[in-house]
Image: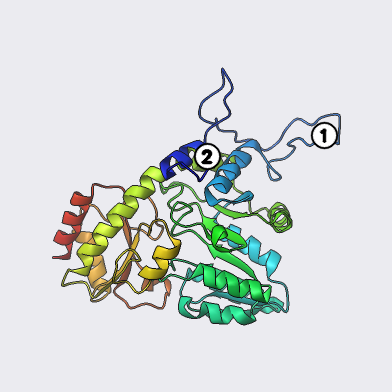
Amino acid sequence: MSGPYGDSTRSVKATASQRVPGQPVAPPPMPVAAYHLSDDESEPLDSYGRSSNPTWRQLEAALAALEGAGWALSFGSGMAAITSVLRVLAKPGATLVVPADGYYQVRRYAAEYLAPLGVQVRETSAADICTAAESADVVVAETPVNPTLDVVDLHRLAMTCRSRGATLVVDNTTPTPLGQQPLSLGADLVVASATKALSGHSDLLAGYVAGSHGELLAAVERERLLSGAILGPFEAWLALRSLGSAGLRFDRQCHNALAMALVLRDHPAVRSVRYPGLPADPAHDVACAQMRRFGGLVAFELADASAVHRLVERSDLLVAATSFGGIHTSVDRRARWGDPVPAGFARMSLGIEDVDDLVADVVRALG
């Protein structure tokens, strides 16, 4: 499905229902927990919603198609997805590498729950992750890194992990499968928060794992069953409903992000800007080699925390929110969450507003 089709076509086609006369064109919601059982106890039917259900399967088939994976598994959140993977892979005595500059909850989970079990946890930056992988058993990479937007060379990292026999897990939340496909670059598993740009409406929590190693996916699926880290069937339907427009939305978000990065780069109130799509960005060359789009996030630094708050207060279009990927443009001052960034460092998630309106609003709000 990745051949002659564009991303909007792929998104629509991935969510299409089977062509059955008299049946709905769009998949109907199936928020069910219990099913009638068959007298034939060997018949593989749905029995209980925590094990499997039709709505999950439709969503997971769509996610697998977009990621270029053999299988995908849905979860109740991105954190539920990645922690389930880590419980399967990071056994006592194993060395686990996690991003020191990526999503802070991942390293907190590793430090607070895995390290006490005997897992050797090493935190490393995107710049040093290939070196750290040379002595690791499990490597978690996030690229572009949230929130600094540095980029990891996934092909190089995958080759390092393969020579070591380490398992490479890539968080693909920021670029989405419409911007980057880590499995094609050598990753063993993809994890992501579908809460963000794929669902794109800021109205549900969801996550997923995708890959093509059957035994590994089966182990993760077993972990999901036993831990109960599941996605509700109705939320799965909401995600499936939203996924059909992901290509259209993400294309606009990326377009707006590049325009905003160019404006912020030249504004006197802005100290620095990071966006992989800028030719002068230090990650630009690597991003061009492995990304099809550069994403909807822009990182920038103002003078201090007050300057970030004033930007949002003076704007008619910006909202203050810590999630990202929705249709509204949002700003999040990351130091408030403990990220190792300056007080005036902010991450802007570009929405789908008209770009001229958005740029004019931000320039006016910056003063």
Q: Is residue 173 left or right of residue 300?
A: right
Q: Observer-nearest residue: 358 or 318?
A: 358
The residue shown at (13%, 65%) is 367
User: Looking at numbered disc 1 in the image, what kind of residue is underneath it?
Assistant: Glu
Q: Is residue 29 left or right of residue 95?
A: left
Q: Is residue 181 left or right of residue 287?
A: right
User: Looking at numbered disc 2 in the image, what kind of residue is underneath it?
Assistant: Ala
Q: Mark 1 points at which residue?
A: 43
The mark nearer the N terminus, 2 or 1, is 2
Q: Observer-nearest residue: 42 or 32?
A: 42
Q: Dot 1, crowdedness within 10 Å: few (<14), some or many (≥20)?
A: few
Q: Name the residue under label 2.
A: 14
Q: In this view, does 254 lie to the left or right of 76?
A: left
Q: Observer-nearest residue: 338 or 65?
A: 65
Mark number, residue 313: none
Residue 95 seen in the current view: yes
Work out which residue is located at the far front of the displayed protein and give it.
4
Element marked by disc 2: helix
Q: Position of residue 257 (x, y in %)?
A: 30, 58
* Vertical relation: 252 (above or below) 91: above
Q: Position of residue 82 (x, y in %)?
A: 59, 62
Element marked by disc 1: loop
